[in-house]
Image (tube, rainbow, N blue to C red):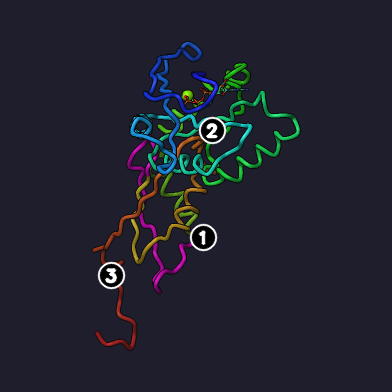
């Protein structure tokens, strides 16, 4: 919604149902979420709270960036917040009509750098004013909604993880080599994986490695993924450590 000449006038979220390619979508236009220190008064504080609530209920967030200014620090934090909330993300580089030819590549590179940690999010250049390139949006939204519902069959997941683990074993931590013995996808929207681990802890680097592999293998465009680990202490006889020769038990 183009509200005023200056950004920062929207207070309450505006809900509307819009038919995109004949299919109804509920779109919520919220106030921009600002940094705490930039919030001037209670009215604005309330507007930001309402925007955060809308985010919690959303399937996909469309993060609208002013293409003439590039990604701000606050927008980086918002992208992080969206991903942490488990919400899908599409980055909209708006005001593309006002970005001159020469600076377009530079602006795009800047977005790639500053939003590298959500490199899985599609980036669409567009103009709300002229409507140009907006026709790409419904397809992108639908794609993200779909990838969020992806379900990977357990046998496939375990076969893949066994292979990745054999080629790149998790690093030793505190003198112990951890091992993923079993994995399941526990939930969708967003796709959530639980890894059962024995023999130590799996570190965040290795989880990122696995996330990268999963993203290579499947189409998780526009959705955050969640990977959790659970320690599993086995009672199976072959897993009970035998005393080494020469050690007293
Ligand atoms: N050139 C150009 N100007 C745009 C475009 N989209 C928005 N604007 C202008 O940017 C200004 C602010 O637009 P808004 O949509 O009200 O901004 P906002 O960030 O949503 O602000 P609030 O809703 O008030 O919080 C207006 O003057 C718009 O005309 C665009 O695609 N191209
Ligand atoms: Mg607005």
Q: Categorize mark 2 by other alpha carbons within 10 Å: few (<14), some (14-19), many (20+).
A: many
Check disc 1 and report the residue beneath it.
168
The residue furthest front is 41
Check disc 3 and report the residue beneath it.
240
Q: Secondary structure at mark 1?
A: loop
Between circles 3 and 1, the one closer to the viewer is: 1
Between circles 3 and 2, the one closer to the viewer is: 2
- Region in magenta: 168-192
Asked whether residue 136 is drawn in magenta, I would say no
Hey, which quadrant is residue 32 in on the image? top left
Residue 34 at x, y percent in the picture: 44, 37
Residue 67 at x, y percent in the picture: 61, 32
Ligand 1 location (quadrant): top right
Residue 43 sits above or below residue 199 on the image:
above
Hey, which quadrant is residue 84 in on the image? top left
Q: Main secondary structure of the magenta part?
A: loop
Question: Does residue 67 appear to the left or right of 164 in the view shown?
Answer: right
Identity of the residue drawn at 59% across and 30% down: 93
Q: Categorize mark 1 by other alpha carbons within 10 Å: few (<14), some (14-19), many (20+).
A: few
Residue 126 at x, y percent in the picture: 61, 24
Which of the pair 104/231 is nearer the observer? 104
Q: Secondary structure at mark 2?
A: strand
Question: Does residue 237 appear to the left or right of 114 in the view shown?
Answer: left
Check disc 2 and report the residue beneath it.
91
Q: Are marks 3 and 1 in contact (CB under 8 Å)?
A: no
> CA–CA distance between discs 3 and 2?
50 Å
> CA–CA distance between discs 1 and 2?
33 Å
Q: Categorize mark 3 by other alpha carbons within 10 Å: few (<14), some (14-19), many (20+).
A: few
């Amino acid at each position: 919604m183009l509200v005023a000449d200056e950004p920062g006038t929207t207070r309450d979220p505006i809900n509307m149902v819009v038919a995109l390619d004949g299919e109804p979508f509920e779109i919520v236009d919220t106030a921009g979420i600002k940094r705490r220190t930039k919030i001037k008064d209670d009215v604005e504080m309330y507007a930001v709270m309402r925007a955060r609530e809308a985010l919690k209920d959303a399937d996909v967030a469309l993060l609208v960036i002013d293409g003439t200014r590039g990604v701000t620090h606050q927008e980086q934090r918002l992208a992080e917040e969206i991903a942490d909330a488990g919400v899908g993300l599409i980055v909209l580089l708006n005001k593309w009509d006002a970005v001159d030819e020469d600076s377009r590549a530079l602006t795009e590179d800047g977005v790639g750098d500053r939003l590298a940690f959500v490199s899985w999010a599609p980036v669409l250049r567009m103009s709300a004013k002229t409507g140009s390139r907006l026709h790409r949006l419904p397809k992108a939204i639908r794609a993200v909604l779909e990838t969020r519902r992806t379900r990977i069959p357990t046998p496939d997941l375990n076969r893949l993880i066994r292979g990745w683990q054999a080629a790149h074993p998790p690093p030793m931590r505190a003198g112990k080599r951890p091992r993923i013995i079993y994995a399941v996808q526990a939930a969708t929207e967003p796709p959530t994986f639980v890894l059962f681990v024995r023999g130590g802890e799996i570190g965040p680097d290795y989880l990122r490695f696995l996330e990268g592999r999963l993203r290579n293998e499947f189409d998780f465009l526009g959705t955050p993924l969640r990977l959790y680990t659970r320690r599993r202490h086995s009672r199976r006889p072959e897993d009970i450590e035998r005393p080494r020769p020469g050690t007293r038990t």
